[in-house]
Amino acid sequence: MNTCPSLSKSFLAALRRFLGKGLLTDPADCWPYGYDNSRRQALPQAVALVTEAHQVQALVQCCAAEGIPLIPRGRGTGTTGATVPDLGGIVVSFERMNRILDIDPENRIARVEPGVINGDLQRRAAAQGFFWPPDPTSASVCTLGGNLAYNSAGPRAVKYGTPRENTLGLQAVTGEGKIIRTGVSTTKGVVGYDLTRLLIGSEGTLALFTQAILRLSPLPETKRTLRATYGDIQAAAAAVAAIMAQPQTPCALEFMDGAALAMVRRFSDLGLPEDTGALLMIEVDGSHQGIDSAVQAIRRAAAVPGVREIHSASDPAEIAALWKTRKALSPALRQVAPKKINEDVVVPVSRLGTFIQELARLSQEFRIPIVNFGHAGNGNIHVNLLVHPEDPEEMARAARCLDAVFSLVLELEGTLSGEHGVGLEKRDFIERELDSETLRLMRGIKDLFDPHGILNPGKGLPPIS
């Protein structure tokens, strides 16, 4: 439903004065900016292709004066509808603000614009011996601004942290059209409130990022990869808990349950026994001198009762072969259920086994196939409900199943989103996790940053009932 005021000729003329050909108004040009990787889509009233911070500031000021919503967008890889202009308004695309302004090895920082592709930064940083730890699955196409907006991390978060731990400072434009600078350029700093961490994960509802100072890490000297298989989920969950309880932290600890393995087996030769109940992919990095002892420590921790096999590799060809199972999963899921419901939840690592076991029960109860995989080291599991959207009865069962999944997550003291954000898809469930006083404070923060209510309205926080 479009509730936005219409865009007058004079208003559009004012935008063209500083956007020029970067303002799109033809529906045929605007439609490609009206969807993300969820099932939602809506036609923007216009699209602003910004290239400079002063354009973002002028755009916000114009829209604030007219009450026109602004919806920030990178490359549209999000899964929660956070970049969908469901209330109308202008999509502000940061795809052309894609400059890596500086890579400073001496201070271990990079200065970037929000439209830089994650993979492009990784290549530039690697040439100087560094990397930025957040590595979402979509790193080859997603933008750093989107990573910051959702606090998207990926497998390496288990050891190196999320964007919140790897971002030192930001430049952003508030809903009043004011440019602010948060944080520092140093690895220590405690002056004022930590607005940097507040803005990261806010999905463009508080301010629009125009620049970021990112904390880089040195590339490890070497890596080793282990693939551990287990008879059942409880054994795999016990292994995850044991691995995370000892000093050597893996740089990736990925999980696939029996349903995921069965799904992949339909499309790829896994080289695994059919009764394998769960699989862990474990990556260890470090120095040449210390890698063997680190691998042995993690190997010992993974060898819990119920382990079937722990296979290790160090050369690139064998590592690629070991990761084949994990990489085959997404194509397999796309073939079986192109419109699957993909949820991103987190539970305490110690409760991972209970969570997956209960998901199997819900799958049977609601007759909805559920496939689970994800970042086991921090309990971040991607729960995939395989559905056919053209079947109304099945979709109704899926909705009840999803409701039960979220209830289960909260019963286990987890959280409803680990790295995909809230957007529209999870907005109406947020009151289950956050109490009314906390929500009141959050709405007050939103009002301070965005007094006119134009920055990605209706996303993230539930409406006041």
Image: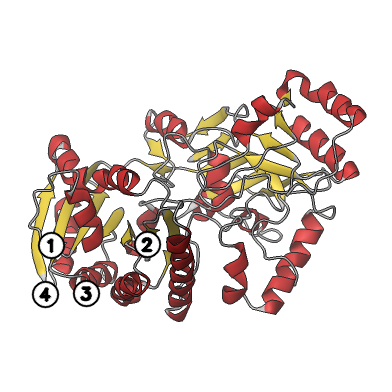
Other-residue count near label 2 (Cα within 10 Å), few / some / many at <14 / 14–19 / ≥20: many
Which residue is disc 3 drawn over? Answer: 234
Task: In the rendered view, tell whether residue 101 sits above or below residue 400.
Answer: above
Q: Secondary structure at mark 4?
A: loop
Which residue is disc 1 drawn over? Answer: 276
Q: Considering depth in this image, is 50 or 44 the residue closer to the camera?
A: 44
Which residue is disc 2 drawn over? Answer: 381
Task: In the rendered view, tell whether residue 196 sits above or below residue 55.
Answer: below
Q: Amino acid at mark 4?
A: Pro
Residue ID at (75%, 69%): 464
Q: Secondary structure at mark 3?
A: helix
Answer yes or no: is residue 250 visible. Answer: no
Residue ID at (38%, 28%): 127
On screen, residue 234 versus residue 164, left or right, reads left
Q: Position of residue 133 (x, y in %)?
A: 42, 46
Q: Amino acid at mark 3?
A: Gln
Which residue is disc 4 drawn over? Answer: 305
**C-alpha distance separating marks 1 and 3:** 12 Å
Q: Secondary structure at mark 1?
A: loop
